[in-house]
Amino acid sequence: MIIALVFFDGVCLTRIVLFPLFYPISLSITVNRWVFNIFANKDAIISRMKAQKSQVKPPLVSIITATYNDETYIESSIRSVLSQDFTDFEYLIINDGSTDNTKKIVQRLQKEDDRIRLINQKNSGLVASLNHGITEARGTYIARIDGDDEWLPHKLRTQVAMLEANKNLVLVGGGAEIMNQDSVPTGFIFNVARNEDIRLGLCIFNQFCHSSVIYRRQTALDAGLYPDTCPAEDYDLFSKFAEHGELANVPYPIFRYRISDGSISARRRDEQNNLAKKFSHRNWDNIQPTVTSRADIKRAFAYYLKNPINHDFGISHKHAYTFVLMRIGYRMLQKGKISKGLHQLWNVASTGRTAAKIVVKWGLDIIKIKLQPSRRKAKTAV
């Protein structure tokens, strides 16, 4: 029967009988050759893979969130980032060994948007997490947001446009809408906006809200990344940015800043204040502020009052600038520069009733603070 089949249709029989017998052997030989070729040419294959990866255009912005046990607010924070009207970004979330549901929440949201990159690590602290994120980032710019804050939709678009338009600009912050732990708005934060005013302000206190900033990644690397000075690491690093280029603040709110009992700033306020005082004096020594003329103050007032959003924000910026100049005057007095200090305070106070009230009120507060130890000693003696 079989011989007859071979004679009748040898080709057909070969297909029927030989194919089932020898196909597994043939497949095995093919696979072995394929594996051999991979190992024999692994260097060439790896090079091609790297070349293909390099051809993929990196995102313009890398966003970094360092999170630890933020399960209450992390989802709203992430969604505020994903809702930006600027979309060319990657989102690195550094999970610093969270013990609550933070990781699960991020993993669920990661399935909705592939721009999210979750990086899990053992608990290492905020500074180590931020620096880890910067080294992993692929973007030209680094944007920063805490796990309990929220961005307004125009935030990235506004700041990226500023950085792209001015190559000397290395750091951009912005105003904040304050909210409590129940997400209820309670006020606003405004810092001075112009480069020269920010540099003066850094001699007194930090001029940037951390979750508002975006900066050039290369500048952060050149400045040495975040130093181990938490909870004032942002003030420390941003002060060093001033050595590398221009600084700016968007003159209106671009994010929502949450103040809650569990925040690092709330828990370590005294330590933060002591470090901030140290950095402010360091910046003062580097810049050596001089007396600001009354004409320059007036010109700055006119600039800040022309706020692109509304007049109330302009007034707030004017007051922020007045406060910086007033503090510089009192710092001059503190450092023994009596003539310069009085001249500075006079120039500020003579610009109007509001400025005069700020100068006088601050002076009275200083006197009260200075008198308190004397009063306590007097009571003890009695």
Image (cartoon, rainbow, N blue to C red):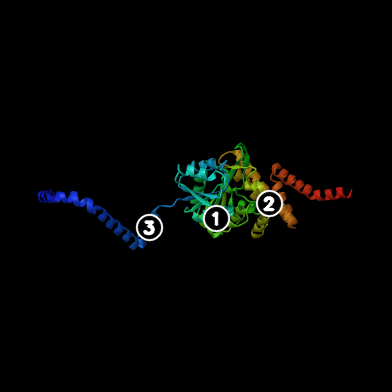
Check the image and report above or below for 31 versus 316: below
Q: Mark 3 = which residue?
A: 51
Q: Is residue 366 visible?
A: yes
Circle 3 packing at 10 Å, graded few (<14), some (14-19), many (20+), is: few
Q: Nearer the viewer, residue 304 or 170?
A: 170
Residue displayed at 58% across by 38% down: 310
Q: Is residue 254 visible?
A: no
Q: Mark 1 = which residue?
A: 131
Tell which tag, 1 or 2, sits nearer the viewer.
1
In the image, 286: left or right of 366? left
Residue displayed at 76% across by 49% down: 366
Check the image and report above or below for 71 versus 283: above
Q: Mark 2 = which residue?
A: 273
| Circle 3: element type | helix
Q: Residue furthest right?
A: 382
Q: CA distance from mark 1 to mark 2?
A: 23 Å
Q: Nearer the viewer, residue 136 or 234?
A: 136
| Circle 1: element type | helix
Check the image and report above or below for 304 versus 38: above
Name the N-terminal-most of marks 3 and 1.
3
Name the N-terminal-most of marks 1 and 2.
1
Tell which tag, 2 or 3, sits nearer the viewer.
3
